[in-house]
């Protein structure tokens, strides 16, 4: 009897968390524990900027960024395609291919935050 290779799950690995820094941190930790250092560093930087500039824009931008990140990363196939499109945009010499990949990146992000 031959065994088939396990296919990646098509559904989300985790439900979409609340749109708060604490809930997003938990989600990031579940999806990619290695990304927590970046998350924490960016949160500290956003809070310092907010304090220094008397504005809530940096923490809001931080939450929006990580909300999108979780929306993409919770679907393994979506994340793989997102990373492939990023690679194409950064490495391809073909302008049309880069534009198509950039358009697909935008579509993936739109789909991720709509969920």
Image (cartoon, grey):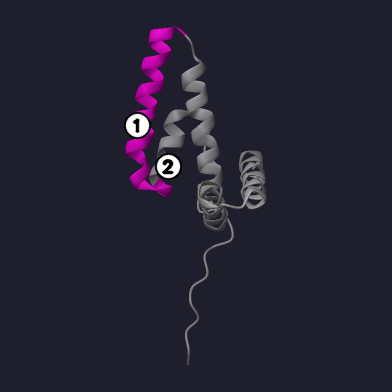
Mark sitting on residue 28:
2
Give the mark nearer the N terminus: 2 vs 1. Answer: 2
Please name the residue shown 49% across and 73% down the image: 6
Cα distance in 3D space between marks 2 and 1: 11 Å
Q: Residues within 10 Å of mark 2 (few under 14, many from 20)?
A: many
- Tell me the element at label 1: helix
The residue most toward the front is 93
Q: Residue 66: say if magenta.
A: no
Magenta segment includes 47: yes
Task: Write down the residue under mark 1.
Answer: 40
Q: Where does the magenta region start and end?
A: 30-54
Q: Give 107 or 84, whichever is nearer the viewer.
A: 84
71 and 86: which is toward the camera: 86
| Neighbour tally class for label 1: few under 14, some 14-19, many 20 plus, Cα within 10 Å | few
Q: Which residue sits furthest bottom? A: 1
Q: Secondary structure at mark 2?
A: helix
- Residue 67 in view, yes or no: yes
């Amino acid at each position: 009897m031959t065994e088939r290779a396990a296919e990646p799950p098509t559904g989300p690995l985790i439900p979409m968390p609340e749109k708060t820094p604490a809930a997003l941190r938990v989600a990031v930790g579940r999806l990619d524990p290695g990304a927590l250092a970046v998350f924490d560093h960016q949160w500290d930087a956003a809070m310092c900027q907010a304090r220094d500039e008397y504005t809530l824009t940096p923490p809001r931008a931080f939450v929006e960024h990580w909300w999108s990140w979780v929306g993409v990363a919770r679907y393994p196939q979506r994340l793989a395609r997102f990373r492939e499109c990023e690679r194409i945009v950064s490495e391809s010499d073909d302008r049309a291919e880069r534009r198509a990949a950039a358009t697909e990146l935008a579509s993936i992000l739109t789909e991720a935050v709509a969920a």
